[in-house]
Amino acid sequence: MASFDQNFLIDENIIDTEIKTQDLKPSDVVLDIGCGFGYTLQKISKICRVIGIENDFKIYSYLVDKYELEKNVELINGDIMEMVLPKFSKIISNPPYSIVDRIMDKLTHYSFSSGVMVLPKTLTDALLETPCCNKFSFVQQAFFSFEKVTDVEKDSFYPIPRITSVMLLIKPKEYSLLQEVLKHGEMTVKNALLQSEQNFLDTTKRRSREHLDASIKSIDNIFDKQLKRLNLDELYQLRSFIEEYH
């Protein structure tokens, strides 16, 4: 169990607070990433459908035995980073801290109405900081708004972790051209902008190129750089360009 660097949330009051923030309805489908021994699954399943993802096969087997007759529970065994996620409307999750940054990057590619997660305080501090302190928080703030709900004490977990945790409310922002551009990390800034204008604005390639060429001088220093190689200052420069010209 420890091989996946997971501390299991066992404090029912904290779990109840998570669920309360999401105002669940019977029509909701909740994603629970790293569902552990199923404390959160059990409570959610009394309200709506819940999809639990658990990488540890022993724990997954335990959950299958416990919930195989529960119609509101769907269980998936596997590495979340290697799968296409099923459709869901909300997230209630206490994910493994060792991969939480990768999980959050993955979530930028999915549509959902809201979520709540218990995360390391160092990470939540970065996500809440304005202006952003690093590239990760810049990208996350482009896709989501964040709000602190409450601190989570160490003894709310088993085994007790060495780090402090925070419950964080997550709300997707309205889809934007900046979000579309950031999804093309392997492209140069020029190509990412060109492709994104076609996708987001539904314009022809010719019109997109003309629009781009007419306003590109303000970012000519990063024009040919690969998007994922941009530093934080350059990302702010790109955002300013998009906000001014689009």
Image (cartoon, rainbow, N blue to C red):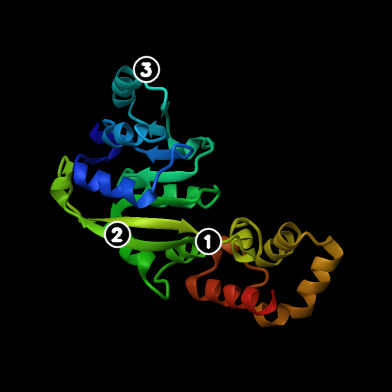
- Could you say which is closer to the camera, residue 183 or residue 64? 64
Q: Residue at x 47, y 52 (%)?
A: 105
The amino acid type found where label 2 is placed reads Val
In the rendered image, which quarter contains the N terminus?
top left
C-alpha separation, residue under disc 1 versus residue under disc 2: 18 Å
Q: In this figure, which residue is indicated by the disc labeled 2? A: 149
Q: Residue at x 20, y 41 (%)?
A: 12
The amino acid type found where label 1 is placed reads Lys
C-alpha separation, residue under disc 1 versus residue under disc 3: 37 Å
Residue furthest bottom in the image: 218
Q: In this figure, which residue is indicated by the disc labeled 1? A: 173
The amino acid type found where label 3 is placed reads Leu
Mark 1 vs 3, N-terminal side:
3
Can you tell which mark lies on residue 69? 3
Q: Residue at x 45, y 57 (%)?
A: 171
Q: Position of residue 15 (x, y in %)?
A: 26, 44
In the picture provided, is 3 more to the left or to the right than 73? left
| Up/down of 32 relative to 108, above or below | above
